[in-house]
Amino acid sequence: IEPGEVEAVLREHAEVREAVVLVREADGGAAGEKRLVGYVVPDAAESAAPRDELHEEFVHEWESLFGSTYGGEAADEDPTFNIVGWNSSYTGEPIPAEEMREWVEDAAGRLRALRPRRALEIGVGTGLLLFRLAPECDEYWGTDFSVEAIRYLERHVSWRELQGVRLLERAAANFSGIPQGYFDLVVINSVAQYFPGVEYLLRVLEGAVAVLAPGGTLWVGDVRSLPLLEAFHASVELARAPENLPVATLRERLRRRVTREKELLLDPEFFRALPHRLPRITGVELRLKESRHANEMTRFRYDVLLHVESNAAPVAPEWRSWDGLGGMEALNGLLVEEAPEVLVVSRVPNPRVAGALAVLDALDTGTAPGGVPELRARAAGREAAAPPPEAFQVLAEAHGYRVRTRWAARGGPGEYDALLVRDGVEAALLEDVVAPRPWSAYASDPLASRRARWLLPELRAWLKDRLPDYMVPGALVLLDALPLTPNGKVDRRTLVALESAAADETYLAPRNGTEELLCGIWAEVLGRERVGVEENFFELGGHSLLATQVVSRARQAFGAEVPLRALFEAPTVAALAERLQGASGAERSAAWRIPLRRGEGPAPLSFAQQRLWFIHQLDPQSSAYNMPNPLRLRGRLDVVALRRSLTEVVRRHEAVRTVLVNRDGEAVPVVLPPTPVPFPVLDLTALPEEPRRAEVLRRLTEEGLRPFDLMRGPLLRVLLVRIAEEEWALCFTLHHIVSDGWSMGVLVREVSALYGTYSRGQASPLPELELQYADFAAWQRAWLTGERLEAQLAYWREKLQGA
């Protein structure tokens, strides 16, 4: 195989920008076994994914999450300060009430300073701002897509007899019935990050500007910063990391966390370019958050004021760079001696994010030989070396000034500008309008992982249509960009690391059916090849939005109620499985109940079964659709317990007790009553070793080739061959008309589980089991390739030509 040929076919797909195909050692396979892995960088601009469907799914999940969150009352019984659901990314615990109260009061104070009379809040939530602003407004309208939020507010607004409050249940972009040019303030606070993309945000902003009167203000608060995305996640991972965690593992965890980001983050440049899209906006202010507490909301977020048709006269400030100024003492002297009316100190290092940026730089360059302790020390040192925004506030108040801070207009993401305005002077630090780039360049893509789930099957189908099966990669990995070496070539070793799990994460396989189902759900939602039962959902990159997907699918899989809080309280597969297994008898039976078909007459055959039945009529002696599965057992085997286990599984599953009867030329499935499964046991221990091995392969091949009688059954056969004192070959053979590739895993898992119950009354597992290994390799090759395959192809060519 030439991997370049596969790469070329991948690149032909309209939604693929770059592709690399590597040959890898197969995970969990025999030594030397290879597989192809394709690494793909999608072209988001060419995505043909069903956008409306993805948007609807995205919004529905947030609606479900917030509906569950808003259903409860405030923890401290103060309905005007209901902060349920505000949890720290660093600890997973609720953010301390003291910090949340300061955050709320700071936002309310900034909005109150605008002196609104008619306000509209989009995404009103539990009313943290409404209860503080509405008493001072003539009218306060609030919208939210959560019916639970609206009901919650209606109760407490009515109880407090707040006048002029009007609540509407609707999506953020729905402005129908809201008067145009009416409000002097529109608030979108801590909501934009839950929008499905930048185009949706633009629709909301267009609607918000349209309902504002001239001179009004659009407040977009608590915006997550895109330039600080990696720095934020680096700080979170460092806070969670144990002291002895290898730096390479920390780097891998950071990469996974960044790629799984599901919220909308915005570059401040987006708002500087926005007047080109919305010309009614005549002034843009970007502001840092103000707080005594350093948490994720005050460090990595910012507020935006968009002034609509404002007549405020601009004031030309005096500019000084922080490096040229020489520090806080020099600034103090400047304010005393020169007393400028308006002063801007530009490009001040921001201690709130300096530490996180230092950690990110060290991870990118590999310059932290001391590991996690060194990274923490470096972050602390960088933070201590820079003046906090609060220092400007203290100095300004001492000299009769007010302060506003923003992300630096001409600096990097770790710098800010401070505007000092003498009391009595009106001045704002308005942004220069910049020429717009494509709007997607200013924002993250919350739907990226959903598009990936749509794109991967599309790419597999694309490859299968154009390449033989053996050239189709066994795994496809989607990346934001291909890693490069210093000389600009693709770094293939890094590609392998990107696919692999972190080195310190030991994988523990599921031990029962509940764990296996949950592991499968988690792997699909988190976009991982596999998930171990002891891995923490949130440490793997999970968050509240993904948690709603997990519990929704768990409810369907187990047929029992799984509350959202269960995943937060039991964040590992093992813990959640134990909770499910400890449910009531009714819930537990529902989890494992297999519904039987009720109704008149036999169940119809599926299309695939009809096709197999038709082919079988052409050649009843064909074994083309036999599905033989040889296994090796090592250890003491209780044959009686194995026979009982298999009989119970067959009793449980109607499919393997089904035969097909020909009635008037049509196949009709008939489910036979449960009976003991024929279970021949062949003892070959008396033969010498070499002849014994040859006889095992001969018997297994013969068993696999023996045709089934679909009318009489059974369509499951079992052969047990004793090879040595504690070594056995166990072969299950099923016909494809009652099974598929998934069926064998179910069969083996359930037989193994029941064996522990029947084996002399002890909960002992089936002896060490290996599937299709070593000695059976030659048998597999004979079964899948060679003369037998050619003979089958020739046979069917003749049959089809005759037909």
Image (cartoon, rainbow, N blue to C red):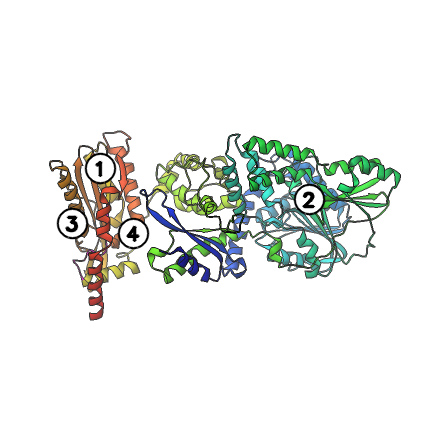
Q: CA distance from mark 4 to mark 3?
A: 21 Å
Q: Earlier in the sequence, mark 1 or mark 2?
A: 2
The residue singled out by tag 2 in the image is 129
Q: Earlier in the sequence, mark 3 or mark 2?
A: 2
Q: Is residue 646 shown to the viewer in this render?
A: yes
Mark 3 closeness class: few <14, some 14–19, many ≥20 residues within 10 Å:
few
Mark 1 closeness class: few <14, some 14–19, many ≥20 residues within 10 Å:
many
Mark 4 closeness class: few <14, some 14–19, many ≥20 residues within 10 Å:
few
Find residue 646 and report its horizontal and vertical position in percent: 23, 41
4 vs 3, front mark: 3
The residue singled out by tag 3 in the image is 702
The residue singled out by tag 1 in the image is 642
The residue singled out by tag 4 in the image is 740
Three-letter amino acid code at disc 4?
Answer: Asp
Q: Residue at x 21, y 33 (%)?
A: 637
Q: Which residues are magenta?
A: 619-629
Give yes or no for contact between labels 4 and 1 (Cβ–Cβ under 8 Å).
no
Q: CA distance from mark 4 to mark 1?
A: 23 Å
Three-letter amino acid code at disc 1?
Answer: Leu
Quadrant placement of the N terminus: bottom left
Secondary structure mostly seen in the magenta stretch: loop
